[in-house]
Image (cartoon, rainbow, N blue to C red):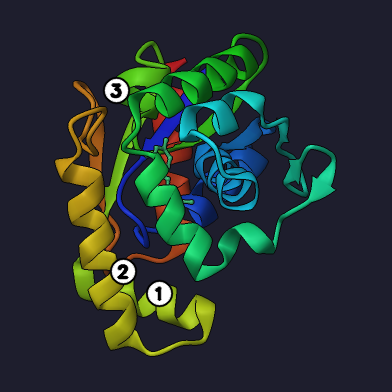
Amino acid sequence: MVVAIDGPAGAGKSTVARAVARALGFTYLDSGAMYRAAALALLERGGSASEAAEAADIRLGERVLLDGRDVTAEIRRPEVTEAASKVATNPKVRSALVRKQRELLSSGNWVAEGRDIGTVVAPEAVVKVFLTASPEERARRRAEELGVDVETVRRDQALRDAQDSAREHSPLRPAPGAVQLDTTGMSVGEVVAGIVELVERGR
Ligand code: DC
């Protein structure tokens, strides 16, 4: 079964999804890492974005592997972050990655995190959560995580939010039936407990 957690950058998705997966004994799927790895493949090899995404052998786990190479740290670099947001607007890239994600999710128990898990990748998910937080709080969390200036993060984030929500293909929006959770002022523990309870109730 699949638990889908979607929402904008900095809403706390990764931390929360990882913790929910651990609490339930499910496997965590970071779909954003796939867009990042595909973007890195494109930056390094050039060619068309969709060919790069199709050809890339992306393995997710403790570490993110691109064609057998550990790219866990590299895919978090700002230029890869920016490139990932761009390749994510390409419908051919999306369909190649969505196919890979559906293959993974077809067996076993998963907590999958991203922007379109509940809307496109796994609309059948037993529980769908749309996590949000105020733009200020999201920027503050990201800045703390990256050790950089809040104002710069807030500006970059606003730009990526606009890009992710306004894109024509699979824009960021809550799936029908998704539980919307504003995590502003909530602790990670509270958010995780809330989602675990939804899952327990839903199965
Ligand atoms: O969650 P993240 O910051 O690692 O995601 C990187 C980029 O990929 C971000 O710009 C949004 C995009 N993305 C997407 O379009 N669909 C997903 N399911 C996951 C990420």
- Residue that sits furthest to the right in the current view: 68
The number of discs equals 3
Q: Is residue 35 above or below residue 120?
A: below
Q: Within 10 angstroms of label 3, few (less than 14), some, or many (20 or more) residues?
A: many
Q: Is residue 36 above or below residue 52?
A: below
Residue placed under numbered mark 3 in the picture: 119
Question: In terms of image quarters, where does ligand 1 lie?
Answer: top left
- Per the model, the C-alpha gap separating discs 1 and 3 is 26 Å
Residue 133 visible to an observer of this rendering = no
Tell me the amino acid under the disc marked 1: Arg
Left or right of residue 65, residue 95 in this image: left
For disc 1, does the CB lie below 8 Å from ligand 1? Answer: no
* Image mark for residue 141: 1
Secondary structure of the residue carrying numbered label 2: helix
> Between residues 84 and 22, which one lies in front from this camera angle?
84
User: What residue appears at the point 21 percent right and 22 percent down from the top-left corner?
Assistant: 177
Tell me the amino acid under the disc marked 2: Arg
- Per the model, the C-alpha gap separating discs 1 and 2 is 5 Å
Residue placed under numbered mark 2 in the picture: 138
1 and 2 marks in contact (CB < 8 Å): yes
**Whole-percent x, y for residue 132 in the image:** 26, 53
- Per the model, the C-alpha gap separating discs 3 and 2 is 22 Å
Q: Earlier in the sequence, mark 1 or mark 3?
A: 3
Q: Quadrant of residue 92?
A: top left
For disc 2, does the CB lie below 8 Å from ligand 1? Answer: no
Q: Within 10 angstroms of label 2, few (less than 14), some, or many (20 or more) residues?
A: many
